[in-house]
Image: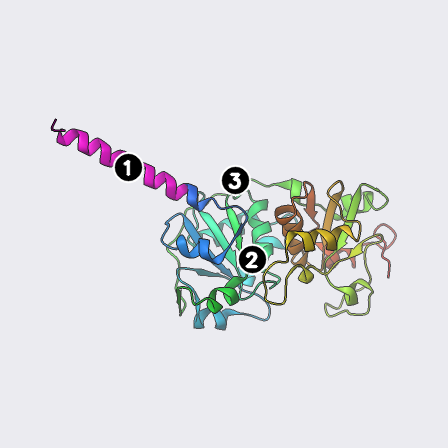
Amino acid sequence: MRLSNKFYAVVVSLLFAVSLFAGIQNANAGSLVETQWLEDNLNNPKVKIIFVDDWPSDKEQYEKKHIKGSYLMGVGGQMGALSPNPPDQAKFEGMMMRLGVNNGDHVIIYGAKAGRVFTLSAVWLMEYFGHKNVSYLNGGLEKWNKENRPSESGMKAAPAGKYKAAGRNESIRIVKEDVVKNLKNSSVVLVDARGTGEYKGEVNNDKNVRVGHIPGAIDINSQNNFNSDGVLKSVDELKAMYEAKGVTKDKEVIAYCQAGIKASNAYYTLKHVLGYPNVKVYVSSWGEWNKADAGKFPIAN
């Protein structure tokens, strides 16, 4: 029996639709992606790759060699959107459009190496403004280059995207007034993600008026979430590290640092790697708390 050209056309259309759907499904890989997954999806038009700069700047390293097709998110643009209280929606939308991101894209965030502090704050910022599909690249550029995966050099502007924030997810943000209300709440645990020197008040690189930590906070430097090779530690290792200090799933977790940056590392690890249901970032963090009324916002050291 001979089949008509019309029948063949229908079959081809169906196959195309199936392949397109498969490509979309493949792009939905969860909040953590590995280098092989990203290489397999480099040509997927719905995947947008963003290199997050840091301080001191990694711009020179980006220009020398970066993941093929990725664009640079500068610290100034990120902090311009993140640092106001609340974060600035218009500045966030403008930054996303300059990076060529559209609302339906799957955004992959990476830095020069895993553990660079600004990288995961970009993930938190996107989640706060309701972006549905954003992932962190495990190991960052350092791992990608070690594996000799497709790269390019130079600096180029992204084709302008069309972007409108979906809204504000206030379930992952907290302000100082709510922090102080929960200082004696046994179902809430504060995580100070800065580092032991700042926690004890022995280091004051940011020239804070008051040094120390929020009373009851637990000292867990979020840089310890990574192995020496820059890859995130295993789930078992991370679980043991946080639970040993009383940071458990049954509690609401409030993470803070100096300006909401290292706190975002703790947020990502607890929420997306360990599956904690209730994690918030005190974005203004110690940068605000140290200057606030000492009678209302106490410190310990």
The label on residue 128 is none
Residue 120 x, y percent position in the rendering: 59, 56
Residue 237 x, y percent position in the rendering: 69, 55
Amino acid of disc 1: Leu
Q: Residue at x 61, y 47 (%)?
A: 272
Query: In this rendering, would 113 be left or right of 44?
Result: right
Q: Nearer the viewer, mark 2 or mark 1?
A: 1
Q: Quadrant of the C terminus?
A: bottom right
Looking at the image, which is closer to me, 263 or 6?
6
The label on residue 166 is 3
Question: What segment is highlighted magenta in the picture?
Answer: 1-24
Helix, strand or loop for the magenta stretch, by majority:
helix
* Residue behind mark 2: 78
How far apart marks 3 and 1 lie (CA) works out to 33 Å
* Residue behind mark 1: 15
Looking at the image, which is closer to me, 187 or 3?
3
Mark toward the start of the polypeptide (3 vs 2): 2
Residue 103 x, y percent position in the rendering: 45, 43
Q: Residues within 10 Å of mark 1 (few under 14, many from 20)?
A: few
Give the secondary structure at mark 2: helix
Mark toward the start of the polypeptide (2 vs 1): 1
Q: Quadrant of the N terminus?
A: top left
How far apart marks 3 and 2 lie (CA) works out to 18 Å
